[in-house]
Structures are given as structure tokens and as C-alpha cells.
Image (cartoon, grey):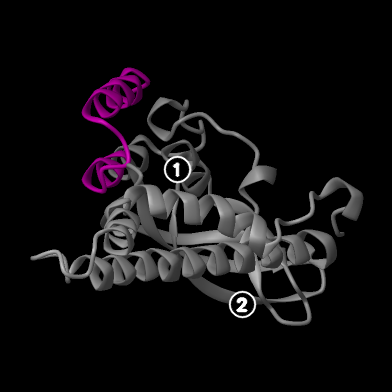
Amino acid sequence: MTVSPQDVPQPRSFVRNLVPTLLFMLLCGIVGPIFLVMGLVVPEDEPGSGWLLPTGIGITVLDVVIALAIANRRTHSQQRMYQLRTRGRRARGRVLSFEQTGVRINDQPMLVIRLMIEGGDITPFEAQVRSVVPDIHIPLLHAGELPILIDPETDEWEIDWDAAKPVAPVGLRKPADDRPAAERLAELDDLLRRDLVSRDEYDAARARILDEL
């Protein structure tokens, strides 16, 4: 099963990704264009001004190069996702494990996720990805299964977070009745050790489990 092309927005062109990125980089590195303009305006025989032009050019060129790299990577990622959404097949990824890396980007954790990808006529295979996962998606990992989009021709794949069914936070979910209390407590201890639940969530969940005994 593939996603209908009309339901998938077209990816941005390289230019559309470049313009805002370049403006942002020039704003952050505004000192480069300032030095560049000053180097062009200030007379060459002005004492102590010889460094303005080359420094301004260097900083501005660096801003442009970084913007080009970011825009190129963003465009490639968007095109890849578009191709997966329009011609890829839906599969499921059984979560084998996920580990914290200790790195946070934009205050979101980067995780190493191991999956067993299977479904339909896809030959099951194990894969691993290092990805920034928003905190609101952490419970989806613990639920044990993620929706996957895979290109059968290239075997490229992506986790389709948008198609994932929302679940309650792990620490607040009611445990399954058929699981022994010891197993649930051990799992809760493991979640606390990995910093996947707060101390308050841990204490509340532990109290609920003990109350069921």
C-alpha cells in the first residue's frame, strides 16, 4: 500500500530552501557583510583598514557555504521523504531496542533505535538508525511497533512518525493485566535508569502497580 500522490505535498526546491537559510546565516554572521561593506567604502590608504575587506569576504563566503550545505541536505531529505511517501510501501518496524546517546538537539534527545522491519512481501531485516526523537514520541518506541515507509527498489526507509498512533506516556499508562507485577516493576526501573520517565512518573506508576497486589 502506498500513499496517494495528491495527499503528499511537493518538496521545496533547492532555491526555496536556500533563501531563508542564507538570510538566517547572514543575519547570524552579520559581521561578515559589515566588514565587507566597510572594506569597500573605507579608502585603501586609511591606516588599519587593510584587513576589513579580506576578513569580510572570508566570513561572508563561509556563511554562504554553510547555507548551501544546509539547504542541499534539507532538499535531499525532503525529496527522499517525498519519494518514499509517493512510491514507497508501508511496513512495520518492531522495536528491538533504543538507547540514549546523551546528545540533545533543540532540547530533544538523540536516540539509537534498532528495528526489525517486516510486513507484506518485504523480507524481514534488522536496521538501526540514529535519530532525534521528540519527547512526545518516546512512548511510541516503548509501545514496540512503528509505521515504516520503505522503497522496495532501494531498501531506503524512514519512520513515518505522522502515521503513528498516539499512545499515553509510558509512566502513566495502565499496565497490561496479563503481565506479572515483577516484570512491570523491572521495566519501570529500566525506564527510570534510561531517563525515559521522570521521578514523579516513576513513583506514581510504581504505586499503582503495588496497589494491584
The residue type indicated by label 1 comes to Pro
Q: Quadrant of residue 187?
A: top left
Q: Is residue 192 above or below residue 98?
A: above
Tell me the magenta residue range: 188-213
The residue wearing badge 2 is 125
- Residue that appears at 72% across and 82% down: 154
Disc count in the image? Answer: 2
Between 75 and 97, the one nearer to me in the picture: 75
> Outermost residue, bottom direction?
154
Q: Earlier in the sequence, mark 2 or mark 1?
A: 2
Query: Within the magenta stretch, is there residue 23?
Result: no
Percent position of residue 95, x then y: 52, 58
Alpha carbon distance from label 2 to label 1:
25 Å
SS for tag 2?
strand
Q: In the rendered view of the protein, which quadrant contains the C terminus?
A: top left
Residue bearing mark 1:
134
Residue type at mark 2: give it: Phe
Q: Residues within 10 Å of mark 2 (few under 14, many from 20)?
A: few
Residue 142 in the image: x percent, y percent?
Answer: 46, 46
Magenta stretch: residue 209 in it?
Answer: yes
Marker disc for residue 87: none
Q: Residue at x 25, y 59 (%)?
A: 42
x and y percent of residue 103 in the render? 27, 56
Work out which residue is located at the far left of the displayed protein and give it.
47
Task: Work out whether residue 62 or residue 177 is closer to the camera in this orientation and state it.
Answer: 62
* Label 1 environment density (alpha carbons within 10 Å; few <14, some 14–19, many ≥20): few
Quadrant position of residue 117: bottom right
Give the residue drawn at x 65%, y 53%. 160
Depth check, mark 2 against mark 1: the one in front is 1
